[in-house]
Amino acid sequence: MHWRRNLYAVTAASFIGFTGFTLVMPFLPLYFEQLGVTDVGDIALWSGLSLGVTPAITAFMAPLWGRLADRYGRKIMVQRSLVSFVFVMAAMAYVREPWHVFALRALQGLFAGYGALTLTMAADSAPREETAYAIGFVQTAQRLGPALGPVIGGVVAQAVGLRNAFFVTASFYLVAVVVVAVAYDERGVLKRDAVEAGGRITFRSVLAFENFVLLMAVIFGLQFVDRSFGPILPLFVGALGTDSASVPLLSGVLFSISAGAGAFGNRLCASLMHRTGPRRVIATACAVAGVGVAGFLLAGSAWWLALPTAVFGIAIGTATTAAYTAASSIIPSGARGTGFGLLATASLVGLAVSPIVSGLLGATSIKAVFLVDALMLGGLAIMVSRLMITSPVPVASAPPTEEV
């Protein structure tokens, strides 16, 4: 079917792009060493700044790129973003100073945002009853890509060196550009957007959609909790008595379990959404994820963490896909780029804030991070069950818009 071809195209582009990105980014501290930075504190500082600047800038730019996508088409905006990654990643191979890396990462943030737009394209192409399936399919690729990228990147870096690994990453993005250009057909989507457009879409009008601000809060909370594990999980594994030589391996296994379970949750959401409404799916998934996190507080050994990690991963993946699907159902097609751009901002702010907060909490007590995560997920479950409105909203109609 035509919509499935479009779905496979954006899924492949997302998987290739997310995999390519994580080929080299986990090894950025080693790259700074090659650039002559020897002090461990300086390496950590440059790595943190360089890794953080891109999502920080993207958080501000995503709504703008989404709005331009509504006006000029999603496909050209995704191609613009991917092409910028080709040049930026290739330029990374030529840097000579640490600030060069930081500057290129900042430039990357200005032109990033293809992840949210590919979700928009998947939602645009799919029939309404298949929206959860389409969004979950792309999110599965976006979750599995970063799980596989570091493994592939380690092999590539060892084979060709860190500098040349950036060329490999650039080639990944080039392939993604070709996939979108050749396989994605936007003509039907553009016609539907023209029919549904009822005036200029503004950020204020999108925020006025029913449940939209609530769903932004949900996506922020889910991303905050999901990313809080990175800074403290290896420390927690070690604190449970694991041999120091086994901590990296066991931590990697747990991160892989979380990624795989999250991908399963992304796919599971579609069948759950067919049986019940988004309010129940989101609230229940948040509650189950909270139970999974609470399981960390009861862990007596590191291997016990595999079970709560799997429970948490499935639930968080289900809740995330359900939240994006619910948002898609209340936004007219002609405004989805703007809407998903705002959702991306909420997600990226959660991504930026989470490691900082979890690091500060972890300095006091590692278990305090899991306690806060469990309470936040429980709060989200209660908030959604009480505040989310379940009355159907016609997708083809938009609220009154204003000139800005």
Image (tube, grey):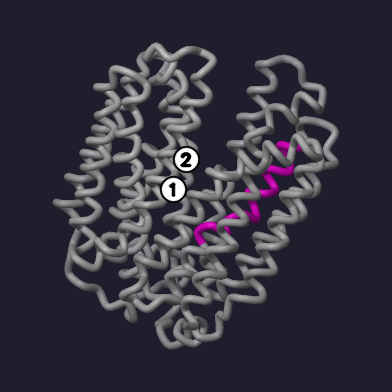
Q: Position of residue 257 (x, y in %)?
A: 42, 39
Q: Position of residue 226 (x, y in %)?
A: 39, 39
Please report the residue visible at 29 percent of the width from the left and 28 percent of the height from the top.
372
Q: Nearer the viewer, residue 69 or 129?
A: 129
Q: Nearer the viewer, residue 240 or 282?
A: 240
Asked if 306 appears above or below 183 in the picture, the reply is: above
Q: Is residue 37 magenta?
A: no
Please report the residue visible at 50 percent of the width from the left and 31 percent of the height from the top.
252
* Marking on residue 142: none
Q: Position of residue 3 (x, y in %)?
A: 47, 79
Left or right of 249 on screen, residue 53: right
Please report the residue visible at 67 percent of the width from the left and 41 percent of the height from the top.
153
SS at mark 2?
helix
Whether pointer 2 and pointer 1 mark residues with C-beta atoms closer than 8 Å, the reply is yes
SS at mark 1?
helix
Asked if 342 appears above or below 121 in the picture, the reply is: above
Q: Quadrant of residue 300?
A: top left
Answer whether residue 314 is visible to the viewer in this image: yes
Look at label 1 and name its amino acid.
Ser
Region rendered in magenta: 101-116
Magenta-drawn stretch, dominant element (helix, strand or loop)? helix
Please report the residue visible at 68 percent of the width from the left and 27 percent of the height from the top.
29
Q: Which residue is mark 1?
A: 347
Q: Nearer the viewer, residue 229 or 275?
A: 275
Answer whether residue 399 is visible to the viewer in this image: no
Left or right of 359 on screen, residue 281: left
Q: Which residue is mark 2?
A: 351
Look at label 2 and name its amino acid.
Leu
